[in-house]
Image: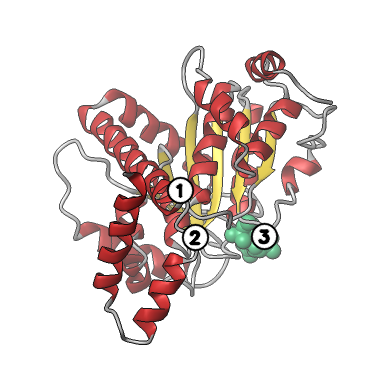
Amino acid sequence: MKYSDEQLRAGIAAGDVRVIARLITGVEAGDAAVRSLVASLQRATGRAHIVGVTGAPGSGKSTLVDQLALRFRNAGERVAILAVDPSSPFTGGAILGDRIRMNSAAADASVFIRSMATRGALGGLSKATVEALHILDCAGFDRILVETVGVGQAEVDIVRTADTCVVVLVPGMGDSVQIIKAGLMEIADIFVINKADRDGALIVEKDLLALLSLVDLEPGAWRPVVSRTVATTGAGIEEVMTASERHRAWLEGSAQGQARRVRVVAQMLQTLVGERLLAMALQGLGGQVDKFAQECVARTRTPLQAVDGLLALVAAARK
Ligand SMILES: Nc1nc2c(ncn2[C@@H]2O[C@H](COP(=O)(O)OP(=O)(O)O)[C@@H](O)[C@H]2O)c(=O)[nH]1
Ligand SMILES: [Mg+2]
């Protein structure tokens, strides 16, 4: 069925999962009409708390998110899960077991699960994700959990835009050097050492605490929390929830927290402006980028000359 704009707006306001799903599909496909509708949506009151969860494939992110979602829901919240990770499809373990299946009209609308492709059109990833988060926020969810694979810059960028960033580590995988290299020290508000039923969890924790003790924190700054969990049994999940509530309170109730929110939004705006400018600039340039790239490979042009050449074409095209 085709929805009118009015029906879509009313559906979002009512938290209708079919409308939410349809709009997310639209932004994922880059549908211009949907995108402008989404841009005009306003959240009536309050705002969702967005918790980003990142970590290597297999570290237990989906299991953890599932546990968190279930508990937040049982606390009476409306919860959405956005999984930006099709390589590990969301099976909805505990949630399924609890007989709430998302994405179907008959489902309990209090938990909504949706996965999004990690690779879209040029620059499409962060834009579509930001739009999807806005849709979920306007649909009145209290808590939005975003799972991404923390291996690429794009995924780290998504988690960076969350209010609270959870980085999942497991024994025997991420040693401290990897944590630093991946830039995770800067983004993590909560470190979860999952699979704490395995050997080595205490070593990871000790390493991590040693690393964290080297970071100079300004007065009032957030001190990252380190929790050990066994996501498959739910052990330690309460602690993660408590830490995320504390972090939310810090964001909302302190000058440093407010400054951090402004910083995060400013970064996101820069990324989005960058994506849009790039798309605008390259529009109509056709195969020019490839042509310049070939010349760089053939060494008849340096990359910086190629950039100057492309920018000259962009400027000429705008006259
Ligand atoms: N032993 C153990 N296995 C876990 C734990 N958490 C998750 N797993 C298992 O690890 C595998 C990967 O989990 P998944 O949540 O899909 O990881 P993701 O790729 O990070 O989303 C699954 O087989 C889980 O059952 C844990 O705390 N302990
Ligand atoms: Mg997963």
What residue is drawn where x is 62% and y is 30%? 34
Left or right side of 101 for 128: left
> Separation of disc 3 and disc 1 at Cα?
17 Å
Instruction: Say if mark 2 contacts mark 1, CB within 8 Å.
Output: no
Q: Quadrant of the C terminus?
A: top left
Q: Residues within 10 Å of mark 1 (few under 14, many from 20)?
A: many
Q: Residues within 10 Å of mark 3 (few under 14, many from 20)?
A: some
For badge 1, the amino acid type reads Ile
> Separation of disc 2 and disc 1 at Cα?
29 Å
Q: Which residue is mark 1?
A: 158
- State which quadrant residue 214 falls in: bottom left
Q: Which residue is mark 2?
A: 286
What residue is drawn where x is 47% and y is 30%? 49
> Separation of disc 2 and disc 3 at Cα?
35 Å
User: Percent x, y for residue 148?
Assistant: 54, 53
Q: Quadrant of the N terminus?
A: top right
**Mark 3: which secondary structure?**
loop
Left or right side of 194 for 292: left
For badge 2, the amino acid type reads Gly
* Front residue of 205 and 158: 158
User: Percent x, y for residue 7?
Assistant: 72, 15
Instruction: Say if mark 2 contacts mark 3, CB within 8 Å.
Output: no
**Height in image: 278 above or below 214?**
above
Q: Is mark 3 within 8 Å of ligand 2?
A: yes
User: Percent x, y for residue 232?
Assistant: 66, 55
Q: Which mark is residue 88?
A: 3
Q: Indicate which quadrant contains ligand 1.
A: bottom right
Front label number (2 vs 3): 2
Query: Is residue 192 shown to the viewer in this render?
Result: no
Left or right side of 179 for 53: right
Front label number (3 vs 1): 1
For badge 3, the amino acid type reads Ser
